[in-house]
Structure formats: C-alpha cells, structure tokens
Amino acid sequence: LYKGKSCLHAVVDRLQRIRLWRSGQERIKLIEGLDEVAFGTLAAADAVTVCGLRPPRYAFFVLSGASCDVVQLFLDMALHFGIGIERAMVCWFGGFFLSIVCRHTFHRYLVFGAHVGGYFGSLLRMYLGYSISLILSTVFDYVMVDMLSFPHYLAWGVTLLWTGAFNYFMLKRCWKMGGSSKEKTGHTERDFDESEMVLLPTLSESDVDLTV
C-alpha cells in the first residue's frame, strides 16, 4: 500500500511538472491541481486546470460517465455472452445497476468531490438518483428491442445517448443531499462556466517544448 501511494505521488508530481514553453513568455503548466484530487477531498472539476483553463464541470461528468459506460458495456456483454441472458432489457438493467458503484467512485474524484453524509449514505443516494433513469432507460430498451426489433447493442447505444444529460442533473442534486459539501471539504462546491476561464494565447506546435 505504501509503495502504491509513493508511486502515485511520483506520477502526480511528474505530471504537474510538465510545462508548455513559449519563447519570450513565462512557461505554462500543462496541468495543476491533481494532488488536491488524489490526496485531498476536492473533485477534479473544482481543483484541476489544464493550461490555465478550468474546464466546465459537465466536461468532467462526460469523462467520468464515458469511462463507466465502458464498464457497463463489459458487464452487459458478460451477462449476455457469458451467462447467456438473451433479453436485452435484463442485460441493460443488470449492467447499469452494477456499474453504479463504479460511477459513484468516478464521480467523487472527477465531478462532485467528497462524499456528503459518508460513503454508504452517498452511495445509497446515488442509487436513488439513478433509479428513475434506470427504470425509464430499461423500458426504453424494451421498446427498442422487443417491440421495434432493434439489434441488442444498437438499442444499447441509442439508450445510452439520452441518459447522460438526464443523469447529470439528477445526480448533481442528489449528491448534495444530506449535508453541505463545505462540511466535508472546507470549500463550497460551485460550477465553473466559460466566463470563469482564464484565456491563454494560442500555442503553435513550434512553441511547445515538454520539459520537466
């Protein structure tokens, strides 16, 4: 465990040392704030900047969600091909339900920050937050496959498309229930929009020199 943590420290430190060089100007750090995410209680959406820009929170949600969608896909395939479950809606429900634990962890580090009300309380709220989406998407998948005769994984992809934005707004509300994020982190959670970004000069390929 100690070696693993030391290795993570080294990776984070190495990444945060990378700078983009522009002649005649100060070097720009490629990425900052990773240490506050890996070893603190903040989410990447609250702490991380890339080339001086703080991406919007929804961008981190997309990254987190897309990573967990891959996990859900493998779970769906395990149920369908491994166990032999033929019904697409059963595979969708099972894969989605099981992937929520993974989504909970990814969203903590990338999107929303420290668990409010403890890990299990936060996980329960996430399951409750996903419950509406889980039910609606399962019914939608049933209509696509069983009634409209769409192929299993084409219906899976179409169902996935509309659930992302819906889940974001549901989870953003559920995560804050049970207490204030300031109690856990010492910081108030806020959204960052484009007006809060620090704009930097455009870097050409010839201006960039990665050094550590």
Image: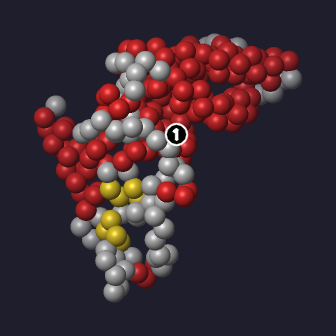
Is 73 located above or below residue 66 in the figure?
above
Q: Of 4 and 190, which appears nearest the observer?
A: 190
What type is the residue that disc 1 sits on?
A: Phe
Q: Report the residue at 40% width, 64% height from top.
A: 51
Query: Which residue is the extreme one toward the left?
Result: 2
Question: Which residue is depicted at the point 38% across and 30% down?
Answer: 181
In x, y percent, where is residue 88?
70, 18
Q: Which is nearer the eye, 50 or 208?
A: 50
Residue 86 x, y percent position in the rendering: 68, 14
Looking at the image, residue 58 sits to the left or right of residue 12; the answer is: right
Query: Seen in the image, is 154 located left or right of residue 64?
Result: right
- What is the crowding at mark 1: few (fewer than 14 residues within 10 Å), some, or many (at least 20)? many
Identify the image quadrant of the C terminus.
Answer: bottom left
Could you tell me residue 2's position as x and y percent?
A: 13, 35
Which residue lies under the disc numbered 1?
A: 61
SS label for mark 1: helix
